[in-house]
Amino acid sequence: MAKLNIVLGTHGRFGEELIKSAEMIVGKMENVKSVSLLPTMSFEEFMHQVDSVLNELNGPVLALVDLYGGTPCNVFTALTKKYHHNVIAGLNLPMLIDLYMNTVNSETLDMDGLIKKCINNTRSAVVHTNKMLK
């Protein structure tokens, strides 16, 4: 079975830097790419860039985007009709690390279960730490 491809879609270079930060914790990450929407890009340029990246990939793809309703989210979601990948909005460091660690050595892939676990784990990673001190 082909490994899961994780593609980050973000405003600015957030995704590229998120990968660097995650690699500080888990080591070199394979099958993880980032597509950055830069201020100088048009919607069409970004769409073309995302289309090119998705077209190069073999195997299942899960796209993680930074902001629901933003251009990266809209572009990746629009391209699901062509590439049949899944998109999760709300990208953050715990989400990326958890998703990667849950798939890096997996022999099988239950995409629906993986997405559900990713969302649930991300929700539990949001903590008001002051309340934990009591």
Image (tube, grey):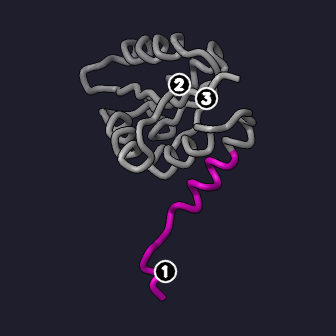
Mark nearer the N terminus (3 vs 2): 3
Q: Secondary structure at mark 1?
A: helix
> At 53% from the left edge and 40% from the top edge, which residue is drawn?
89
Numbered disc in front, either 3 or 1? 3
Q: Quadrant of residue 11?
A: top left
The residue furthest bottom is 134
**Left or right: where does residue 119 sit relative to residue 14?**
right
- Which residue position is annotated with label 2? 76
Spatial CA distance of label 3 from label 2 is 16 Å
Q: Position of residue 23 (x, y in %)?
A: 39, 42
The three-letter code of the residue at mark 2 reads Phe
Spatial CA distance of label 2 from label 1 is 37 Å
The three-letter code of the residue at mark 1 reads Met
Quadrant into which the N terminus falls: top right
> At 40% from the left edge and 33% from the top edge, which residue is drawn?
10
Looking at the picture, tell me which residue is in the foreground, 61 or 42.
Answer: 61
> At 29% from the left edge and 26% from the top edge, which residue is drawn?
38
Magenta part of the chain:
116-134
Indicate whether 35 appears above or below 90.
above
Mark nearer the N terminus (2 vs 1): 2
Indicate whether 40 appears above or below 12.
above
Number of labelled discs?
Answer: 3
